[in-house]
Amino acid sequence: MRQQHNEDQILRDLKAAYTAAFEGALGKVLLDDLAHFCYAYSTTESEDPNIMQRREGRRQVFLKIMAMLDLDLNDILNHQEEDYD
């Protein structure tokens, strides 16, 4: 029970750190940049398997960030639309 409490606290602390790092207008800019760099909007497919693996690795990191922020790709796309309105 105590270990679960510690793990829950660690997860809450991590989520708070991710939120602090990516909040506000600058956070939106960073997430948008990372989304493009990490192939969030496009396929990671490549004829070269090494390139494809590298792209998939980037994508996994981005998905981790999104999960820690409790966001999905639609949330990022909505932020972009708001910026252009």
Image: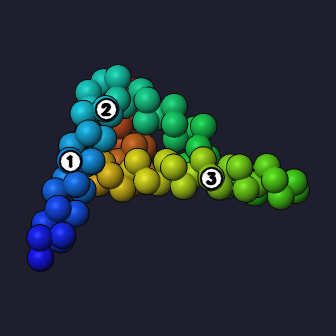
Position of the N terminus by quadrant: bottom left
On the question of residue 41 being in view, the answer is no
| Mark closest to the chain's N terminus, 2 or 1 | 1
Farthest residue, direction top: 26
Q: Residues within 10 Å of mark 1 (few under 14, many from 20)?
A: few
The numbered mark at residue 45 is none
Tell me how far mark 2 sits from mark 1, CA to CA.
12 Å
Lateral position of residue 1 relative to residue 30, left or right: left
Q: Residues within 10 Å of mark 3 (few under 14, many from 20)?
A: some
**Which amino acid, mark 2?**
Ala
Image location of residue 10, percent across then percent down = 22, 54
Q: How is the image coloured?
A: rainbow
Image location of residue 79, percent across then percent down = 35, 37
On the question of residue 11 being in view, the answer is yes
Q: Please, what secondary structure does the residue beneath circle 2 have?
A: helix
Residue at the spot of label 1: 13
Residue drawn at (36%, 56%), measured in percent from left and top? 67
Image location of residue 81, percent across then percent down = 39, 36
Residue at the spot of label 2: 21
Q: Please, what secondary structure does the residue beneath circle 3 have?
A: helix
Lateral position of residue 35 relative to residue 43, left or right: left
